[in-house]
Amino acid sequence: MKWARWLLPVLTLALVLGFTWWDIGGARTGPGPLHSAHAAVAELAQGANCEGCHRAGAGVSADACTKCHAAVGAQRQQGVGLHGSLAADLASRCEACHSEHHGDASPLIAPHAWPRADVADVKEYDHRHVADFGLVGAHAALDCARCHEHALDAQPPAGGRFLGASQQCTSCHEDAHKGVFGADCARCHGQERPWAEAPSFPHDVFPLAQAHRQVACTGCHAETGRHSVASLQAQPLPARRCADCHDNPHGQPPLQATALRLADAQDCAKCHTATAWAGAKVTPEQHAGFGFALRGAHATAACATCHGDGEREPRWRGAAPQLAACAVCHEHDHGAAMMAAATAATPPANGCAGCHTDTDADWKAGQMPVAVHAATGFALVEPHAELACVKCHQGAAREQRFPGRKPDDCRACHDDVHRGQFDGQERYAQCTACHLPTRFSPAQFGVAAHAATAFPLTGAHDAVACAACHGAVQAGVRQFHGTSSDCATCHTDVHQGAFGSTAPGCARCHDTAAFAPVAKFDHASWTRYPLVGAHAKVDCAGCHPRAAARAGQPGRRLGPARGTSCSDCHSDPHAGQFRLGGATDCTNCHVPASFGELHFDHDKSRFPLDEVHKPVPCAKCHIGYRSGELTIVRYKPLGTACGDCHKLGVPKAGGK
């Protein structure tokens, strides 16, 4: 079985030899069949003339290709077109892009040919290699086959799929002008805009501006006649007038008016422009030439408002009305008496010009003269004389604009700035009780009026500004009614509540003329400490030491009293001999009138005075003694026996 291992190599060799014989001596005559386009060439038929395309030992010859493809050769020679722009090494190797010897199974232009020629997508080819024919506008969106009818053919024609196409417009498009304007269609039409617009056409005799640019050429130029394009090329005509193309809608005979009714309206340019025919409007200066100057609201009114149109009649006919004769066009809702007064005050015409002028931007902005307004029963005095009517007369209905307000009824127009504080008092029913009718500020509520309130203005109060006392503002409203009359509401209590804050309060000592005390202080009633005797003559500061000044408060105020007991102010000359329970009551012996006047009742002591002792002076029994710097009279303790003062056997002075 040694021969078995040689079986596979032998069979393989036999197959190779068989295919070689078939290729060389059998059915094949070359490396592969030619594409049908080349096979149809007699010189290349049946592969009998390989040298027609190949150079011996050098492969395909580019020069051999250009013998048949002369147009490609011309591009290479001149450096133009797709083949003329290829790199030198690629331009000399036609087989790099064009495949052959595969029959019709592969196209002659290989799929990779376009990318190698720097065309990523053949469908997006922009003609950049074609001189003077860039794809712009509508041409850029066309399929290749629209201009190159063999672009998709399986068998390309002898002249090629793409070369040889004409760049003249008429090669694809019908010449609507029949050769009148020559073959350069792009000179007028271009490629960017729709063909019918002819955006580059030199319309010099009649410049196409504004609205005329929107009209199709056939709208003015019929195919035949003296104004056709062909006729105007042969014999130019002057530019046409408006009336040559447009009807006059303003009632010129024999046409019926379908828009504004105007006389002698032949020159359309007086009012119209080519921008917007329907929006035409004469200038105020032009209208003044018709006899009626447009001022104020007339200058902005629509023409048809006065002149009518095809659906409504004009407000006037014939010559322009007088400017002051407003009622010719305008209605009004003023009463007969009002109009009679206005007409009498401002003749001639119908009285409107007395209050309104044609320069007013708005009819409601008129100003009624004082004399005319007085006829309504409401005389215009300051400040009403300078107000615009619309400030008082507002609303759509007449009843709203003219409600019949009375001259003295301020609240009919003005808000109550006091928010009802005085509603409960009849005397303040109208603002004029406190304010002048000519101006709101300053108020006229003076001292006399204030005297009728619960707080008459007396003394220094009559010089104080209202806001000094009525300064509180609640919810944006200054408070007047209900203001407290207590002094402490406006004034700082320098006594810090020592004398109370309710009535009579400060009035115990002070009046409104000045703060310094002007009334005798009733010390007995208000302090329960009557000032009698010597106390009534003592200065207040003698018992009420003045305090030092404090920030924001008056200085040297009277301070609290030292006390109500004698020892709070006076020293005890008896060195505590009469002290009971830690206190000495001087009133047991002394009276406030004079310290030296005594009312001591000796009969109530431990030593009642009999007939003999009553005449004896006090100092005979109560002898003083020195204690330091003081001399103290001894009262206690003293003996009550006779021997405590008398020595037996010792005669009295005088030998008795």
Image (cartoon, helix red, strand yellow):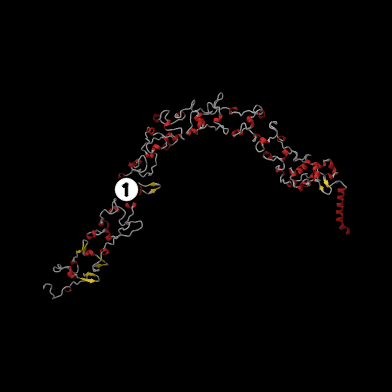
Q: Is residue 1 something one can see in this rendering?
A: no
Identify the residue at image location x=86%, y=56%. Answer: 9
Q: Amino acid at mark 1?
A: Ala
The image shows residue 267 at horizontal and vertical percentages of 55, 28
Outermost residue, top direction? 254
**Compared to 127, does 350 lie above or below?**
above
Observer-nearest of 320 and 23: 320
The image shows residue 244 at horizontal and vertical percentages of 60, 27
| Left or right of 290 in this view: 380 | left
Observer-nearest of 94 and 425: 94
| Left or right of 504 in this view: 137 | right
The image shows residue 364 at horizontal and vertical percentages of 44, 35
The residue wearing badge 1 is 463
Q: In what element is the residue under mark 1?
A: helix
The image shows residue 603 at horizontal and vertical percentages of 18, 67
**Compared to 352, does 157 lie above or below?**
below
- Please identify the quarter of the rendering in which residue 69 is found: top right
- Please identify the quarter of the rendering in which residue 610 is found: bottom left
Observer-nearest of 523 and 5: 523
